[in-house]
Structures are given as C-alpha cells and as structure tokens.
Image (cartoon, grey):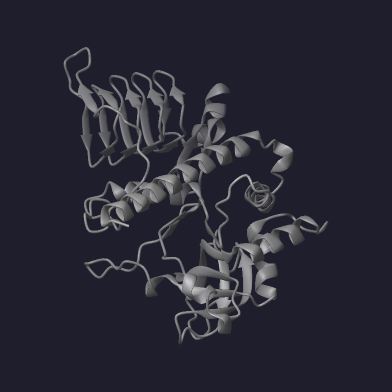
Amino acid sequence: MPEGGAITDAAGSAVRQVTELLRTIKELKAYVDSLTPKDASGNAQNDLSLWNFVKRGISPMMPSWFWGMSTSGSGAVPAAQSVLTNPSSGAMGVMGVMPDVTGGRTRYGQDITTTFGNIYAGITDFIEKPAQPPCMPGNDDRSLASMGIYLFDADYLYHLLEADMADPASRHDFGKDVIPRAVAEGRVMAHPFAQSCILNVNGAPPYWRDVGTIDAFWSTNLDLASINPELDIYDTEWPIWTYQHQLPPAKFIPDDSGNHGVAVNTLVSGGNIISGSHISNSVFFSTVFTRSFCHVEQAVVLPNVTIGRGCHLRKVVIDRRCVLPDGLVVGEDPVLDARRFERTDSGVVLINTEMLARL
C-alpha cells in the first residue's frame, strides 16, 4: 500500500475512535440523567449503575482498567498501569497516597501501609475519615492519606461492586465498604504521589488538596488568587486542560456616579460584568454579574451568579445560580450569618439558592 494510503487509513481509524468515544459519552450522559434518586442510595451503587451501562454492550469500547478520582480532591497522579500488568504483584488496584500532618484533617480516608522501599507497597488497613488519624510507622506527626485517586482492573472492580450490592449490611459507600473489602482481600497497592507527580520547579512540595469541606474549598480557591500561589495555573510547562465555555471577556463598567469597577488580587473569569464595585482577594467563576456599589472581599463565587446593588460580602462561598438581593450584608454579624446561611467555625459562609429562598 502506498505510504499516503497508510496515513489515510490511520487517520480514518483515529476519527472513527474519536467519533465512537463522543457517541459513548453522549449515551452515558443520557443514561446518568435517567437515574432516579432510588438508583443512588450510595456512591458505590452509582458506580455499579454506570458500569452496567458499559457491560451491557451499549459501547464496544470495553476498558481494561477503571480510573477513578474523588470530586473532593485537587491534584494528579499518573496511571499506575504497570503494577496491574505485573503478575507477580498480585494487585488488582492502585491507590494514590501522600503523607499528611495529623490533627484536624478528618476528611481523608487513611491508609496504613508497609514501608515504601519500592514505588508500591501493600495496604494493611484503610479507615474512612477517622476522627483521630493513625500515624505512619516511625513518624508520630504524619498519617498517610488516600488522595481519592484509584486505578482498578475493570473486571475486579465490577466483582467488588456486585458483591457490595448483594451485601444487605453494606452502606454502599465506596470509601466505607468497597475499598475496605479490596484491602482485606490484599489486592490493593499504595502508590506515593511524590514519586510520580510533576515536581514544582521552585522545589515546593507536590501539590494536592482535599476540598471536601467548605473551609478547604474556600481557602484552596483563594490561594489561586494570591501573589505566589502554591499551584501556578499560569505555568506553560504544565498546562491545565479543561472544558471552558465560549464566553466574552470580563468587563468593568462605571456605576451611576462614574466610579469604575475594580478588582484587586482577584481571578475574574469570562462573561463577568463588574459595575462600579470593589472586589478584592476573590475568585469569580464565569458569568457573574456584580451590580453597582458592592464591596466583596475573600469571596469564591461560582458561575451564573448575580450580586445585587450595595451588597457587602466577606469570607463567602456563593453557589451557582444564586441571585443575591440588593443590600445583602454577610461577614459582619456571625449570629445573623449562622441563622440565615451555613457558617463554619472559622467564619466562612456558604450561600446557596435554597438559603436565599428562605430570606
């Protein structure tokens, strides 16, 4: 076959694979949207429902491995495919882990493993979100935290999920039931994040954050707007590829008095309009409309939010699609904030549409 013909065939094959992948994603979304609340009594049951979608043959793209990442984690680790293809390891799953300072970090699942002489080590115990995380052997101030990043042999994971669904005593929770079962069977290995992640040029520790609490979500986002953030999203050597809406640039316009909108130490996404208001040390997601005479400080504002005229907001997380009434004040009266919204012990206030509807 002529060389050009070989290239054409390869390109055609790639196009067919991409087309099939897009079709599968579309069908998978439709299947997920069809699930009713009774189908979602636990995250393990969700996983099984989605896996059944693949197993029943709707998609011919049957995976050999299943890659999973918790939605409450922020970080990355390469696929530990090699350990699963090594028969001598006996592993059917790999879990990304990293040391974490003990005390107060009760949101993490904790792994107690053997020594890390090699790049992988067997897990001897797994405890989901313990109040008192156990320490690592030989290190009294650190525990080994699961990052919520997993790679499983596909057939083995399906076996685990089916067994969990058949167990009447199970809570059908991935961290509380499925992972401990795999650990008890001795089929899961731990992989230290620092041994395979992309290291920071300035020598800073590998970046990963658990954002499963309001405080953690707030502080992690605000760090991105700081002068020297721990995660440099402007690093061209390690770009972050993600889906972005096609939106117009952010716009700053004057208020009725002619005062222009101002943003200091703030990330402002596309589609934002800031009218004669002062924003500082904040992160504004896409399509946020800030009306005139507002003062917003240390705020994380999710997409499609409208902030009414004359609002004064400090240390807030505003959920998507919120419409804040004119003159709303948050961050000055702790008692009033706690009564109207959800306020953490550190003073961060979460605002969502249901809370606003009760005002």
What residue do we see at 47% from left, 34% from top?
Answer: 319
Note whether 195 is above or below 206 in the view shown.
below
Question: On the picture, is 9 further left or further right than 146?
Answer: left
User: Is any atom of residue 133 visible in this view?
Assistant: no
Note whether 210 is above or below 335 in the view shown.
below
Question: On the picture, is 201 further left or further right than 87?
Answer: left
Give the x, y percent position of residue 335: 52, 35
Question: On the picture, is 57 further left or further right than 209?
Answer: right
What residue do we see at 38% from left, 71% from top?
Answer: 196
User: Is any atom of residue 288 visible in this view?
Assistant: yes
Image quarter for residue 130?
A: bottom right
Q: Quadrant of the C terminus?
A: top right
What residue do we see at 57% from left, 69% from top?
Answer: 110
Give the x, y percent position of residue 244: 35, 38
Give the x, y percent position of residue 124: 62, 79
What residue do we see at 45% from left, 52% from top?
Answer: 216
Note whether 239 is above or below 311 in the view shown.
below
Note whether 156 is above or below 355 in the view shown.
below
Q: Quadrant of the N terminus?
A: bottom left
Question: On the picture, is 244 further left or further right than 95?
Answer: left
Total label count?
A: 0
Name the residue nearer the viewer: 150 or 323: 150
Name the residue nearer the viewer: 359 or 20: 20
Image quarter for residue 298?
A: top left
